[in-house]
Amino acid sequence: MLPVRAMIQRTATIAAAACLLCTPSVAAQQAVDTATVMESVERLKPGEFLWFPQAAPEGPLFLMVNLTTQRAVLYRNGVPIGISTVSTGRFGFSTPTGVFTILEKDPEHFSNVYDNAPMPYMQRLTWSGVALHAGQLPGYPASHGCIRLPLEFAKRLFAVTRLGMTVVVNRVETLPRIAPAPQMSPAQPGDPATAFEWAPERAPDGPVSIVVSGADRKVVVIRNGRVIGTAMVAFEEAIRGTQIYMLQSQAGDDRRWLRFDLTADARAEQVPASALRRFNVPPDFRQAVASIIGPGTTVVITADSLTQQRAVTLLEGE
């Protein structure tokens, strides 16, 4: 299991010449050695970021935002390829923690709520107004709930993401809340062998996220930001905390998963498929889900509830 610091040290050796340390006024590529990268990660000033996509040229993307450190880390195939300073919600307008998917993208968006304020390279996380976008970074939480990014980082991030990509917002000491868009009626308690709903036509394609709740004994399947399936589950062991897994690669039935640790280091490690086989769902539902997952699929297993008001960000429109 490698913390970000160790992962950066490893990947920077591979791609040192491709690393990019930017400020709002400096956007030219420059070669930096491993020591420079290591120091830069800890010494990034407001508006600065690191960008080194050559460390992992291909693979699924996943973004982690930490409200405590005011940093965002972009992973590709489990390897960090970008680290940026951010500015999140100020007191009274806190940015919600949770597991989100990108619902909408607009490079020239303007706020519907705050005086038509510009939100360049907007990537919406909730229909109630929380998004990633370029903005001012004073060095502390200062937004109305959105996640502000340096302009150049926001532009680069916008270019590589797609609708449905998973974004996790956490505060280290606080377990993340799950924020799926409630697009269909949830499965009701009943016989685990038959209690499920499946409507893949609601989103015929796009990235897939799967959320499993220990409190609700339920699994929710989200594709391209829409819920396409729910099922009741029976657990083999108690679920504690929250774990996030991402399918790194698959060849037939051979699937390789990455597990992310929700700590300040945002560590990741490769785990066998058996690590996810801690609950039972209807066989037909399992088969249906298996037919749509692929590299980039994210699985969140949490002890939290998806139905309590405190645990769900309602996406009911602005």
Image (cartoon, rainbow, N blue to C red):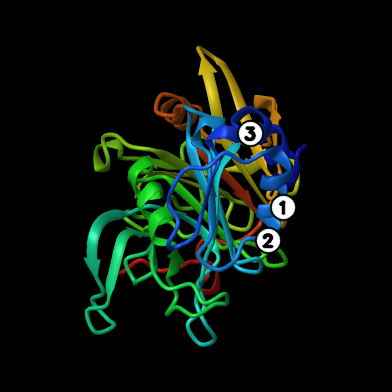
Which of the two labelled residues, at mark 3 and mark 2, occupies the earlier sequence position?
A: 2
Q: Are marks 1 and 2 in contact (CB under 8 Å)?
A: yes
The reply to whether residue 3 is in sight is: no
Identify the secondary structure beneath mark 2.
helix
Q: Which residue is mark 3?
A: 258
Considering depth in this image, is 30 or 66 the residue closer to the camera? 30
Which of the two labelled residues, at mark 3 and mark 1, occupies the earlier sequence position?
A: 1
Q: Which residue is mark 2?
A: 43
Work out how far the residue at label 3 is from the one at label 1, CA to CA, in angstroms: 27 Å
Q: Which residue is mark 1?
A: 39
Expressed as whole percent of the image width and height from the top left, the position of residue 156 reads: 39, 47
As displayed, is residue 161 above or below residue 104? above
The reply to whether residue 43 is in sight is: yes
Expressed as whole percent of the image width and height from the top left, the position of residue 165 reads: 42, 45
Work out how far the residue at label 3 is from the one at label 2, CA to CA, in angstroms: 28 Å
Identify the secondary structure beneath mark 3.
strand
| Residue 185 image-quadrant placement | bottom left
For label 1, the crowd category at 10 Å Cα-Cα, with few meaning under 14, some 14 to 19 and many 20 or more, is: few
As displayed, is residue 163 above or below residue 183? above
Which image quadrant: the C terminus?
Answer: bottom left
What residue appears at the point 46 percent right and 53 percent down from the top-left corner? 188
Q: Is residue 314 left or right of residue 265?
A: left
> Residue flagged by tag 3: what amino acid is it?
Leu
Identify the secondary structure beneath mark 1.
helix
